[in-house]
Amino acid sequence: MKTHVDCFPCIINQTLDAAEINDLPEDQKEGIVYDVLEMLRDLPEETPPPQVSYRMHRVVSRLTQKHDPYEKIRREANVRAMELIPEIRRRIRESREPLETAVRYAIAAQVFDGESGDSRSDIRRELEYAPTADFGVNHLKSLKSELRKASKVVYLANAAGEIAFDRLLIEIIREEYSAEIVLIVKSEPVLTHATIDDAQYADLEPLAHLVTNKSDAPTTLIDDVSDGVNHHLEDADVILSKGQTHYESLNESSLNIYFLFQVNCPVIGREINAELHQYVILNNQ
């Protein structure tokens, strides 16, 4: 998926958010915005949005002189998510369709992503919306069928905080199906995306084989990850891909991917014929 001009306001807003998070003075805020605007002006036409976010992250890191400008947000998201896990686990266990319910809450947890909002009221509102949320695209029936036959599932994590809810979905997959599960996270901090530290904080090591993607890009770029990660992706019977960012970079892949996300972008909504805020379980096959 290439970056549309409609994506530019979101990129500028991400830039301003990063400046606010790091308490930069006004002159430095302006400097960051001008640098990002210059980057957008010179952007190659086919550049996917995650690559743009990656370049923006590098600009912010350079001007703030911080390797991880979002460290505080990721840490707070993890703490808040883990506080909620016992309640959400109970709701999943008591539901008639644990897999569907776990998928719904895993998608709802996208709200922990700093690009989607992370206030307590936003989180609580999204968790109450999750059990009855509308699906713009719903390939759950196909996903269930493929999980029954799968020997290996690769799970592409998205954001810190959100990864605790990924744990709940992985619990259900392990209980209801017999597949090996490989969880792929970021090697280096970038924006709010989940790293190995976030996965360990969510206690995922007993449930899945944790693998870092050997890339600091804010998504999974096939040409940028290690040979080992590519082997896992090619060897997987099913790939579960969390968040819009992965859709933006992998939607044209020939791999068997189920994208799980909430539509927060009108460009993506138009592309997949879904409305803003609807949930999506989309198989690219």
Image (spheres, rainbow, N blue to C red):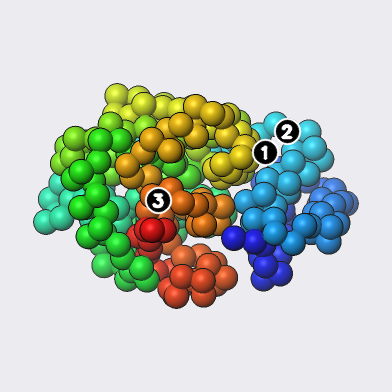
The reply to whether dot 1 and dot 2 touch (C-beta < 8 Å) is yes
**Disc on the earlier residue, 1 or 3:** 1
- Residue 121 visible from this viewpoint: no
Amino acid type, residue under disc 2 in the picture: Lys
Q: Position of residue 115 (x, y in %)?
A: 57, 54
The circle on residue 69 is 1
Q: Left or right: 66 with respect to 132?
A: right
In the rendered image, which residue does mark 2 sit on? 66
In the rendered image, the quadrant that contains the C terminus is: bottom left
Q: Is residue 262 visible?
A: yes
Residue 106 vs residue 78, the one in the foreground: 106
Looking at the image, residue 80 sits to the left or right of residue 73; the answer is left
Neighbour class for label 1 at 10 Å: few (<14), some, many (≥20)? many
Residue position marked by numbered label 3 in the rendering: 257
Q: Secondary structure at mark 2?
A: loop
Dot 3 lies on which element? strand
210 relative to 177, above or below: above
Q: Nearer the viewer, mark 1 or mark 3?
A: 3
Query: How many C-alpha atoms fall within 10 Å of the one at disc 3: few (<14), some, or many (≥20)?
Result: many
Q: Residue furthest top?
A: 206
| Amino acid of disc 1 | Pro
Mark 2 closeness class: few <14, some 14–19, many ≥20 residues within 10 Å: few
Q: Quadrant of residue 122?
A: bottom left
Is 91 placed left or right of 36 in the picture? left
Image location (x, y in percent) of residue 161: 44, 42
> How far is disc 1 from disc 2 in space, using C-alphas?
6 Å
Quarter of the figure that contains the N terminus: bottom right
Please identify, in this view, whether the residue under mark 3 or under mark 2 is nearer the observer: 3
Question: Residue, x 73% and y 48% (percent of image)?
Answer: 56
Tell which circle, 3 or 2, labels the residue nearer the N-terminal end: 2
| Residue 154 image-quadrant placement | top left
